[in-house]
Image (tube, rainbow, N blue to C red):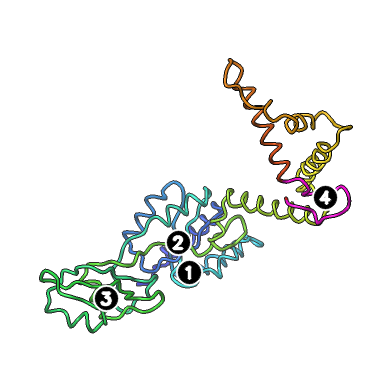
Amino acid sequence: MPLSAERKTEYFERMKSLMSTYSKCFIVEIDNVGSMQLQQTRIELRGRAEVLMGKNTMMRKCIREYIEENPGSPVEQLEEQCRGNVGFVFTNGDLGEIRQVLESNVRPAPARVGAVAPCDVIVPKGPTGCDPGQTAFFQTLQIATKITKGQIEMTNDTHLITKGERVTASEAALLQKLNIEPFTYGMVLRSVYDNGSLFDAKVLDITDEVLAAKFIAALNTISKLSLALNHPTEASVTHSIANAFKACVAVTVELDTYTFSQADVYKKYLADPSAFAGSGGGGGGDAGGAAEEAAVEEVEEEEADVGGGIDMFGGGDGGDY
């Protein structure tokens, strides 16, 4: 039944008001979403977001009228999104929080004949609860079975339906017999509109932690390339200084007539390692032992890594880093 002129006017005013009030919105697909499920979503979003559904022609016409009244408005991008069974969820809050509410409100549903499967359906092996007289039904679907304790038992997991295929009458009947509801339906986020920018909803998967991890990985790559090419950069300068210090210590410990204060501890350790062994007694032994262990670890690291990073005599390929 078509809407009356008064209802259409009321709808247009509401949608224009939402586009003026809110700067963000989700474009959602609502295939197979029932009215009760939609109402539950509205309740959970109350005070944080507004859900608007309607005919695509009405929504496109309302957007065009709004653009005529507000020339240059970026909401013009929303007109092309009014394709298929879609709606809008307007908000000024955090998009991540609203997304969690929308994606969490899903309901299990049976497989209906002719419906397109949104996911693969695998029926697990085990007892089915069906009497032996229904064996022919399973044979029709080429499912291996056996009779156990007076009922049919599936001997293997069965890949019954492939994602994207239409559900046949036999497949739907089998799932109904087994009391399996394989599908879940809810609002599917198609796109996101945020202050004039329209982008795919998958962009919201990029959190601060993901960005930080990507930045650190890129920084490590730049540092490795800089060290390999002997081209100093801000990313590699700390490694270059550390490698230069290791090279200086490696040369100094082999000289009897030259040293510097930072290299003394390494020369002393190499001269008499037993002097750095912890005595195990005394009140201040723990702190001293820890310092000596740290010095020993530095010496071992220096001996393992010496020659890497910077070659003081012009040879080598840059070493390890």
Q: Residue at x 84, y 49 (%)?
A: 311
Q: Amino acid at mark 1?
A: Met
Instruction: State how far apart marks 4 and 1 are (Cα).
Output: 62 Å
Q: CA distance from mark 2 to mark 4?
A: 64 Å
Q: Which residue is mark 4?
A: 232
Q: Nearer the viewer, mark 4 or mark 3?
A: 4
The disc at residue 14 is none
**Three-letter code, disc 4:** Pro
Query: What segment carries the magenta color?
Result: 305-320
Give yes or no for contact between labels 4 and 3 (Cβ–Cβ under 8 Å).
no
Callout in the foreground (2, 4):
4
Position of residue 283 measured from the top left corner of the image (x, y, whole percent): 58, 15
Image quadrant where residue 130 sits:
bottom left
State which tag comes first along the sequence, 1 or 2: 2
| Mark 3, other Cα within 10 Å: few <14 / some 14–19 / many ≥20 | many
Residue under numbered circle 1:
58
Secondary structure found at label 2 = helix
Image coordinates of residue 224 in percent, x first then y, are 73, 54
Q: Which residue is mark 3?
A: 172
Q: Position of residue 269 (x, y in %)?
A: 72, 31
Query: Which mark is in front, 1 or 3?
Result: 3
